[in-house]
Image (tube, grey):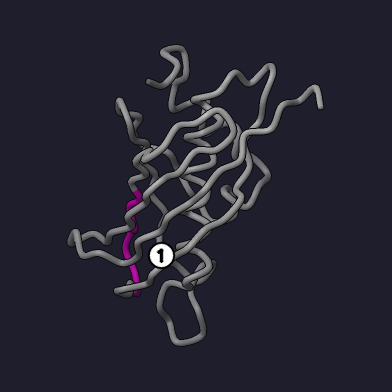
Amino acid sequence: MFHKNISLKNINSFSKDTLLAHLQIEFTEIGDHYITAEMPVNKNNSQPMGILHGGASVALAESIGSVGSNILIDQEKEYAVGLSINANHVGSARNGTVYGKGTIVHKGKSTHVWSIEIKDDLNKLISVSRLTVMIINKNK
């Protein structure tokens, strides 16, 4: 489903000088209907109580779905932006790395819907998100 000429190196290069770089989000795999990324848990994305900030989890989830949508569309004619995200934080992480996997649920002409699960080093579920991405025509 994804464009065959997209590499992880290319995807990760888009993150330079962005929030993704600050949070050290790195894309790690592209599958037929999914994309994965990881993020270290550290002082840059923790809340004062020493656990991963829910906003950082949401940033990882939205990054996964938005990047996934952008590599599904014709980037010369369109671009994809997050429209709505819902997250349920069901676990916590104090250190290590969290891993997000986004699976496309709906691929329409004007919207995409993604389901994103974030897990820790022990494969414990940390957060579940649903992201709606809007596809915008560049010529409008």
Residue 137 in the image: x percent, y percent? 71, 26
Q: Quadrant of residue 105?
A: top left
Residue 77 in the image: x percent, y percent? 69, 18
Q: Residue furthest front?
A: 109
Hey, what amino acid is under mark 1?
Val
Position above or below: 91 against 74? below
Position above or below: 106 against 1? below
The N terminus - image quarter = top left
Q: Residues within 10 Å of mark 1 (few under 14, many from 20)?
A: many
**Circle count:** 1
Q: Quadrant of residue 98?
A: bottom left
Please report the bounds of the magenta region as a residue range: 94-100
Residue identifier under label 1: 41
> Between residues 112 and 3, which one lies in front from this camera angle?
112
Left or right of 63? Residue 136 is right
Left or right of 136? Residue 131 is left
Residue 24 in the image: x percent, y percent? 50, 51
* x 42%, y 45%: residue: 114
In reply to whether residue 38 is colored magenta, the answer given is no
Q: Residue furthest right?
A: 140
- The secondary element bearing badge 1 is classed as loop
Residue 36 in the image: x percent, y percent? 36, 41
Left or right of 74? Residue 103 is left
